[in-house]
Image: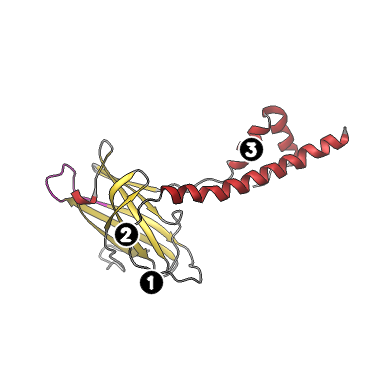
């Protein structure tokens, strides 16, 4: 998205330089995690890196399970299974993958289910997370369906990496925003310089 010079000048004169910076940085938006709800259970899905898995590369996925009211459901309290299907999905299809769920900690969640998924090729997939209480817990059995688009993988095939749970994605998520913010700041400075310097020269 590029703004005309006249519009940039108008924004600066009306709202100041800070508003221009906010306008330019607002052009790029972060992709949100997927959230699904069934009865009294909800789950947030995140796949590293940046919710954009790549074919034939090990992608760490995690599910933040919560009970109605916001209480986290750890995997120790849930008999959970994960199945991966190719799209278009037809009821009765056999899953192409059934990754083993392991205990991980991600962001502010502790003990939630996660799995390393190696998608075989680019395209659309459906992830089915199903579960029921493992022992006397007060939530209903559930089945949640997530649609995932897998991008073309790089030349470095990482599918042979061991399935190791991540400790935390909070640091990785923070680092993922540093480069885009730096780039946006440089673009903003360049745009501001492009508008202001000609005005100074005219004076």
Quarter occupied by residue 158: bottom left
Count of numbered marks? 3
Q: Residue at x 53, y 45 (%)?
A: 29
Q: Which residue is mark 1?
A: 160
Please tell me which residue lies in front, 167 or 26.
Answer: 167
Quadrant in which the C terminus appears: top right
The residue lying toward the viewer, choosing from 50 and 5, is: 50
Residue 70: horizontal and vertical position, in percent?
Answer: 28, 37
1 or 3: tag closer to the N-terminus:
3
Secondary structure found at label 2: strand
Label pair 1/3, CB-CB below 8 angstroms:
no
Magenta stretch: includes residue 110: no
Q: Quadrant of residue 66?
A: top left
Mark 1 and mark 3: Cα distance apart in space: 43 Å
The residue that mark 3 highlights is 21
Q: Residue at x 83, y 35 (%)?
A: 200
Magenta-tinted stretch: 134-143
Near-viewer residue (76 or 98): 76
User: Of callouts 3 and 2, which one flags the residue occurring earlier in the amino acid sequence?
Assistant: 3
Along the horizontal axis of the image, is 99 left or right of 119?
Answer: left
- Residue pictured at 37% horizontal, 59% vertical: 60
Along the line of sight, which residue is nearer the eye, 140 or 92? 140
Side of 161 where 128 appears, left or right: left
* Residue 136 falls inside the magenta stretch: yes
> Cα distance, mark 1 to mark 2?
15 Å
Give the label on residue 124, or none. Answer: none
Residue to which mark 2 is pinned: 115
User: Viewer-nearest of labels 1 and 3?
Assistant: 1
Q: What residue is rendered at 50% in x and 50% in y?
A: 175
Other-residue count near label 2 (Cα within 10 Å), few / some / many at <14 / 14–19 / ≥20: many
Secondary structure beneath dot 3 equals helix
Task: Quote the CA–CA distance across marks 3 and 2.
Answer: 39 Å
């Amino acid at each position: 998205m590029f703004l005309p010079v006249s519009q940039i000048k108008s924004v600066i004169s009306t709202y100041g330089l800070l508003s221009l910076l906010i306008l330019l940085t607002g052009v790029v938006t972060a992709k949100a995690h997927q959230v699904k709800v069934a009865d009294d259970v909800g789950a947030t899905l995140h796949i590293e890196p940046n919710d954009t898995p790549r074919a034939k590369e090990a992608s760490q996925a995690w599910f933040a399970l919560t009970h109605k009211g916001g209480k986290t459901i750890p995997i120790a309290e849930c008999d959970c299974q994960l199945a991966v299907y190719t799209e278009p999905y037809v009821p009765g299809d056999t899953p192409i993958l059934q990754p083993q769920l392991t205990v991980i900690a991600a962001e502010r969640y502790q003990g939630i289910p996660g799995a390393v998924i190696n998608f075989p090729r680019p395209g659309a997939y459906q992830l089915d997370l199903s579960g029921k209480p493992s022992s006397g817990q007060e939530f209903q059995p559930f089945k949640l369906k997530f649609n995932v688009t897998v991008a073309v993988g790089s030349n470095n095939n990482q599918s042979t990496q061991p399935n190791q749970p991540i400790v935390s994605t909070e640091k990785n998520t923070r680092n993922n925003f540093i480069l885009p913010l730096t780039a946006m700041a440089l673009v903003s400075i360049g745009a501001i310089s492009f508008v202001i310097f000609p005005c100074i020269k005219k004076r």
